[in-house]
Image (spheres, grey):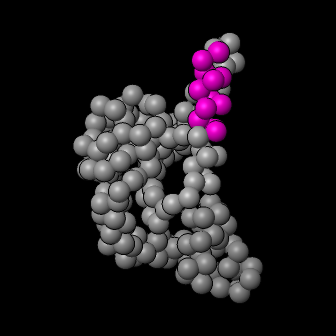
Amino acid sequence: MQAQSVLLNIDYRIPFAKVTQFWADLTGYAYNPATLVSVQTTLDEQLRPIEAQIKEQLKAAAVCHFDETGVRVGGKLHWLHVASNSTYTYLFVHPKRGQDALLSPQSIFGNCLSWTVHDCWASYFTVGKGRHALCGAHLLRELAALMEQGSHWAKSMHTYLLEAYKASRYAPF
């Protein structure tokens, strides 16, 4: 019941009152919203060591991908930052998008020593100790925008990158 309540509230974004109503309707038991807060607090404490392990694994990875997207928190724009590789994903929300977020205690960007793959956002190039690589999908989007403005070199580069990608998928290694 506790795990299901957390799932309903966090993953499905169902408010505490609705989760309480759900359990009351289903079981006749009036689940106290304060209990749900307590369960979530306990779960958060239990997951902290796992979060720390994920962050360490990503910092030590040969390649780590970074991105961000806008989200609303209390009606205000914040940024959901992501660091990931093929095994791990770490997310955190910050009120800022740039250097303040990348250098914040929640971020691992400044401590990654290997390849950091990201978009063309300038802040990524001004902080951190890792080597930089541009994300292919982001680069193709930038080139597509230039193509819409009539750039011929962007079209050639776009075609070249897609062909190089296709060739790399079939390269004998």
Quadrant that contains the N terminus = bottom right
Is residue 49 or residue 146 the one in the foreground?
A: 146
Counting the numbered discs, the total is: 0
Name the residue located 32 percent from the left edge and 72 percent from the top edge.
49
Say if residue 96 shows up in the picture: no
| Picture coordinates of residue 66, whole percent (x, y) | 44, 46
Residue 46 at x, y percent in the picture: 37, 76
Residue 127 highlighted magenta (yes or no): no
The residue drawn where x is 47% and y is 66% is 87
Kindly identify the residue that appears in the image at 61 percent across and 78 percent down. 4
Q: Is residue 26 left or right of residue 83?
A: right
Segment tinted magenta in the rendering: 152-163
**Residue 25 vs residue 105: left or right?**
right
**Image quarter of residue 55:** bottom left
Query: Can residue 53 be seen in this snapshot?
Result: yes
Residue situated in front as seen by the camera: 66 or 149: 149
Left or right for 92, reference 103: right
Task: Classify 142 as above or below 26.
Answer: above
Q: Position of residue 130 (x, y in %)?
A: 29, 44
Q: Residue at x 50, y 40 (%)?
A: 135
Residue farthest to the front, as pictured: 172
Q: Main secondary structure of the magenta part?
A: helix
* Residue furthest right as drawn: 25
- Image side of residue 101 versus residue 2, left or right: left
- Residue 158 x %, y %: 62, 29
